[in-house]
Image: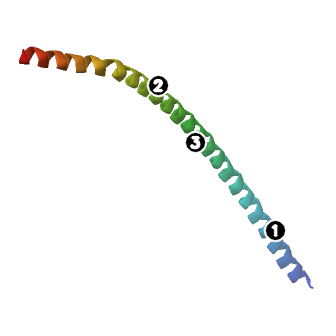
Amino acid sequence: MNDEDCRLLLNALKEISDNQKAQLALQREQFAVFQRQAERQELIQDRAETIQAKGAQIMTVARRTLFVILPIVTLLIVYVSWLLVR
């Protein structure tokens, strides 16, 4: 191997090293983006769970209310029907 070959080899090795450093920097940036997305997804998941819990509470209240109101409405319909027929 002569000096020219050594220089070409060193230049190639330096270029490989530079490319590896650039790739590592890109990977760090992508990992940071991934972490931010994971945190955002966790926040969205927490909000969804909160909304679902509130929805379940609303449905419970609606069922209880319907359980009370439906018999009253039925009785009123029967009473009005009785008044009309009488």
Dot 3: element: helix
Q: Quadrant of residue 25?
A: bottom right
Question: Mark 3 — residue?
Answer: 41
Task: Say which quadrant the N terminus sits in.
Answer: bottom right
Question: Residue most toward the front?
Answer: 86
Q: Residue at x 42, y 28 (%)?
A: 59
Q: Amino acid at mark 3?
A: Gln
Q: How is the image coloured?
A: rainbow
Question: Mark 1 — residue?
Answer: 14
> From mark 2 to mark 3, how far is it between C-alphas?
24 Å
Q: Is residue 44 above or below residue 17?
A: above
Q: Amino acid at mark 2?
A: Gln
Q: Residue at x 29, y 19 (%)?
A: 71
Dot 2: element: helix
Task: Say which quadrant the C terminus sits in.
Answer: top left
Of circles 2 and 3, which is in front?
2
Q: Nearer the viewer, residue 21 or 10?
A: 21
Q: Residue at x 24, y 21 (%)?
A: 74
Question: Residue most toward the bottom?
Answer: 1
Dot 1: element: helix
Q: Is residue 26 left or right of residue 44?
A: right
Upstream in sequence: badge 1 or badge 2: 1
The label shown at residue 57 is 2
Q: Nearer the viewer, residue 48 or 34?
A: 48
Residue 7 at x, y percent in the picture: 86, 77
Mark 2: give few (<14), some (14-19) or many (20+) Cα within 10 Å.
few
Of circles 3 and 1, which is in front?
3
